[in-house]
Image (cartoon, coloured by chain):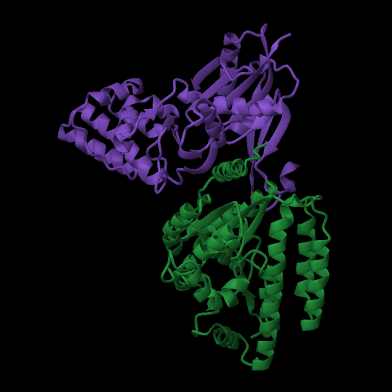
Chain colours: A purple, B green
Amino acid sequence: MKNNAYLGVDIGSISTKGVIIDDSNNIIACEYIKTQGNPISAVKQLIKSLESKFDSNLYKIVSIGTTGSARKLAGKMLGATTIKNEITAHAIATISIHPDVRTIIEIGGQDSKIILVDKKIVTDYAMNTLCAAGTGAFLTNQAKRLDIDINDFGSIALMSKNPVKLAARCSVFAESDLVHKAQLGYKKEDIVSGLCKSIVNNYLNNVAKGKKILSPVVFQGGVSKNIGVVKAFEDELKTNVIVDDIGHLMGAYGIAIMSKKSVKDNDFSFRISDANFETKVYDCSGCANNCEVIRIYKDMKLMDSWGNKCENGLK
Amino acid sequence: MNDKVISFPILADYNTPIKFMIEKMTNYEVRLSPKMTKNTLEIGSKYSPDYACLPFKYTLGNYIETLENGANVIMQAGGGCRFGYYFELQKQILSDLGYNFEFYSLTESDVNGISSIYKTLKNLNPNIKRVRYLYYLLLTFLMIYYMDKLDMYIRKNVGFEINKGSFDRVKKSMLTKFSKTRGFLDLIKTYYYYRKKFKNIALDKPKNCLKVGIVGELYTSMEPHSSYFIERELANMNVEVTRYTNVTFLLITKRFKEKYYLRKIKKYCKFTMGADAMDNVARAKILIKKGYDGIIHIKPFGCVPEIGAMKVLENLCDDEKIPIMFLTFDTNTSELGIKTRLEAFHDMLLMRRGNEK
């Protein structure tokens, strides 16, 4: 008899994460790759590498959950049983690891959120709105500009004794501030450290505005791997900030836990990495609204379509 | 001169009573603006200043489409915030584009709404008698009042209909019937007939369903296109929705309720903040007292009165320990982003109820 296992996939704007857990929420296999603007191939690649880490003689996958901005597309590809937003997934995952958590800070590639928890129940949340300042994508861009590997970003920031002050409101202004300071001859580590501080200030002013941040504070998402930002958060909040080893996998972990409630007794095969998926976008001409309808094909066969506002689009 | 074709911007289902009123009071043809589509917003924002708010862009799109469709007289309602000034700006933009038309703002020519509408309509139909005007004005008001009353019922229950689309079907036939109203008695009869029909629609509604209140800027709240059909999305999640902003409120009840509202929230507001900002704070408080699970505040990007209300709402909801979500709509807000936030809000409300499935 094989044991049950549950697969969670989180397809974000920058990275794609996959986690397989067992009945007691232990991680059996996990993988983290870059999305590179192509969720379909990212999911395929993810499944392929998860397969190699997974012992199919011991376990069988009985449920699949997808989350992240491409959750619908990936959900269709994998035949997911649970498709949920990343906010709920993050909250569920964090509560299962830290039952006493009060504040969850999450900064990802394109978005950032704050989730407030009280007695294992989400009481409030907020997400960045029209602006992507203070997210991972911004940091990656600036690292490139400064010719630094993003993985060294944090350790370089920690070397600084005198961080530069940078505008925090908007990424475009922060960037021009940065260029200006660099031309004036400021040290690289001071600028990098200033960037970490501006991310934190931006987060506290734009996302967490008006919300009370109580400890324990858990910090997750890709940016939580940057020790410079973690340090800046701790300085600003004057409290300890918890970062888990699997902080970047939390969304996938959470959706895997949630998918447990929708178990279907089918043995998931990893064959999808060989199937040919294709999406076609066309403007529906059913009426003047011209909805953009997205159709997804598996091996040239239409699986599903969405984006239509009325029945005309289904033709 | 009998070749005038009157038109006006779309606001949800209020086309029916407005068309009815103008038709009865003038002798000209009333041609409805073409249905709101993505294209409406596209051409609207193309010719709008970038910093103008979303209602400006939608209505300008409406005007251009309806002028292309043959209308040559446009009526606009005017408004309490900078929308009142938009009328002048839109007129300028449209004549710069080379359109030849007459433009009337219904509430602009006098301080008093009723006599202002009369003066405006007098321009179009000099022969209109005061009695006839008042008769049809009251009839239209009553029609709007009935519509809003039934709409309240629909919003609360549409998420629980057993046969999808039953409410929409009944409403459609009601609006057709309303547009052919012959007089007060006829209207009242129609109302009771359809009220019964609505109440007879089969529902599967649990007693303790989630309840969400929507407050916010008037155009965004009322016109479903401008809020990406947020009410329909919520209904699909089996949520009971209440929203107090409607035309009945704006035309009639607003002026009577101001003092009452201010008293209700005297801890937070000492005076009004322009447009409906203060009213929305008071309504949020009323909804919370009625036991609603959460509040959603919606506004177009850059709406000044509502930005003022946000901070007050935050304090109020903080004190009452009720979650509030702020959504801002603009031309490029992605639908997925709104859906993600709504879904998370819904999950959170369920979790707070402690019966997360």
**Residue B30 at what x, y percent from top left?**
67, 75
Quadrant in the picture for the C terminus of chain B: top right
Q: Is residue B183 visible?
A: no
Q: Quadrant of residue A279?
A: top right
Judge whether residue A200 can be spotted in this image.
yes
In the image, residue A203 above or below residue A60: below
Which residue occupies 70% across, 64% down? B151
- Across and down, in percent, residue B28 comes to 67, 81
Q: Nearer the viewer, residue B323 or A283?
A: B323
Residue farthest top in this picture: A57
As displayed, is residue B172 above or below residue B206?
below
Query: Where, by quadrant of the figure, is residue B225 drawn?
Result: bottom right
Residue shown at the point (58%, 64%) measured from the top left: B62
Q: Position of residue A262 (x, y in %)?
A: 70, 28
In front of the other: B35 or B277 = B277
In the picture, measured across the screen, residue B251 lies left or right of residue A135, that is: right
Say if B40 sits above or below A211 in the image: below
Residue B306, given in percent of the width and then of the height, sits at 46, 61
In the picture, which quadrant includes the N terminus of chain B? bottom right
Please count the marks in the image: 0
User: In this orientation, which residue lies closer to the viewer: A35 or A251?
Assistant: A251
In the displayed structure image, the side of residue B13 where residue A192 appears, left or right: left
In the image, what residue occupies the spot 56% across and 36% down?
Answer: A88
